[in-house]
Amino acid sequence: MTKDRTEMLAEAKKILTEFLEEKERELQLIRECLKIINEELGKRSFVTAEKLIIKPEEEWKKTSSITYRQGRREVLLAEVYIDRDGRNLKIEPKIKLNVNTPPFQSFLLERVLNKMKEKDNMKVLNGEINPNEAIKYEVKTEDDMIKEIIIKNILSDERMMSIRNAVRWTFSRMYEKIGGAI
């Protein structure tokens, strides 16, 4: 190698080394800035576990009431709630209604909800809907008294209205059968 070429290579090495050192300093400075920003963001956007936990009262929004008219008097039979997604209903009776009082089992459960369930199961078998989209329901009781009915995966407004009407009719008949006693 010639002397000029050696000097040129040494000069290139020196320039590249200085360039690399400068970029490493810049990179370190950028890392420090990001660390400071992350710490500040952590302080300002920290959410406590209490705020992250959804409270049961906040999951459901009251949408309507089911009432029974007795002459001039109106009796509150139940409150109807809908979840945030608008696909699930919760019905809370406001009077004592026994699960064994007709037509709860024979009409509401068997003829309305179970029929919808059968239709959805057929749709699942035919591949029209996913299994997790099929209607489901749960009746929560305490000493045979209905505490709440939760109906999940109501995928159409028509079904929603049909269920509300069926609950209204069923609870009204049940109220009449118990002699209008609250």
Image: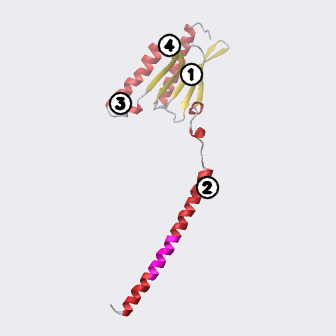
Q: What residue is shown with label 2?
A: 40
Nearer to the camera, 25 or 181:
25
Q: CA distance from mark 3 to mark 2?
A: 52 Å
Kindly indicate the quadrant of the structure image that contains residue 10: bottom left
Using the image, tell me which numbered label, if any, was put on residue 99. 4
Report the residue at 58% width, 58% height from top: 37
Please provide percent x and percent y for residue 12: 42, 83
Q: Amino acid at mark 3?
A: Lys
Nearer to the camera, 55 or 174:
55
Q: CA distance from mark 4 to mark 1?
A: 13 Å
**Do the numbered discs 4 and 3 sit on residues whose CB atoms are within 8 Å?**
no
Q: CA distance from mark 4 to mark 2?
A: 56 Å
Q: Nearer the viewer, mark 1 or mark 2?
A: 2
Q: Secondary structure at mark 3?
A: helix
Q: Amino acid at mark 4?
A: Val
Q: Nearer the viewer, mark 4 or mark 3?
A: 4
Nearer to the camera, 40 or 105:
40
Q: Nearer the viewer, mark 3 or mark 1?
A: 1
Report the residue at 50% width, 28% height from top: 160
